[in-house]
Image: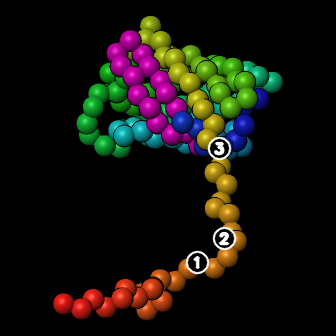
């Protein structure tokens, strides 16, 4: 089942590939990469899902992996645990197949509480060397 959360996204077409971040929450998708932003919705039935995304350029730079900036992309895929794979196409660029992978990001546990207070360095408490006579 595709869970709500933050996903690392990898995607490609015959024209190029890219990576980004996707946030899934209650059927909505919001995502971005270095040049494009994505928004849309998804529907889950067991291990299968469908999604519709709209893309929009936010920064000039590299070309889109479709060769066109503003698109509507339809996806279908499957998910297993923390991973999902999908295929899709953009209505504006018929015949160009998109494929990709989503990987659910895990929350890192917070740092454990220290067992003792940190030691404070005090150079006066260091042993003294004996004085040498010349």
Alpha carbon separation for disc pair 3 and 2: 24 Å
Instruction: Check whether the beta carbons of the residues at disc 1 and disc 3 lie within 8 A of each other.
Output: no
Report whether 72 appears left or right of 28: left
Dot in front, 1 or 3: 1
Q: Which residue is mark 1?
A: 118
Assign a secondary structure to mark 1.
loop
Report whether 90 appears left or right of 61: right
Classed neighbour count for the residue bearing mark 2: other residues with Cα under 10 Å, few (<14), some (14–19), many (≥20) = few
Q: Residue 41 in the image: state x and y as whole percent.
A: 63, 35
The quadrant in which residue 87 appears is top right
User: Compared with residue 24, is residue 65 higher up or lower down, i.e. above or below?
Assistant: above
Q: Which residue is mark 2?
A: 114
Residue 36 versus residue 54: which sits nearer the camera?
36
Q: State whether the magenta stretch is mostly helix, strand or loop.
A: strand
Alpha carbon separation for disc pair 1 and 3: 30 Å
The quadrant in which residue 51 appears is top right
Q: Residue 58 in the image: state x and y as whole percent.
A: 35, 43
Report whether 107 appears left or right of 87: right
Instruction: Check whether the beta carbons of the residues at disc 2 and disc 1 lie within 8 A of each other.
Output: yes
- Magenta range: 9-23
Dot in front, 3 or 2: 2
Classed neighbour count for the residue bearing mark 1: other residues with Cα under 10 Å, few (<14), some (14–19), many (≥20) = few
């Amino acid at each position: 089942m595709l869970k709500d959360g933050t996903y690392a996204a990898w995607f490609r077409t015959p024209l190029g590939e890219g990576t980004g971040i996707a946030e899934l929450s209650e059927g909505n998708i919001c995502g971005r990469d270095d040049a494009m932003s994505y928004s849309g919705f998804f529907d889950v039935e067991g291990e299968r899902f469908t999604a519709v995304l709209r893309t929009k350029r936010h920064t000039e730079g590299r070309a889109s992996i479709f060769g066109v900036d503003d698109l509507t992309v339809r996806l279908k895929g499957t998910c297993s645990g923390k991973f999902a794979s999908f295929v899709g196409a953009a209505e504006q660029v018929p015949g160009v197949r998109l494929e990709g992978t989503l990987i659910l990001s895990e929350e890192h546990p917070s740092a454990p509480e220290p067992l003792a207070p940190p030691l404070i360095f005090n150079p006066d408490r260091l042993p003294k060397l004996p004085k040498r006579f010349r």
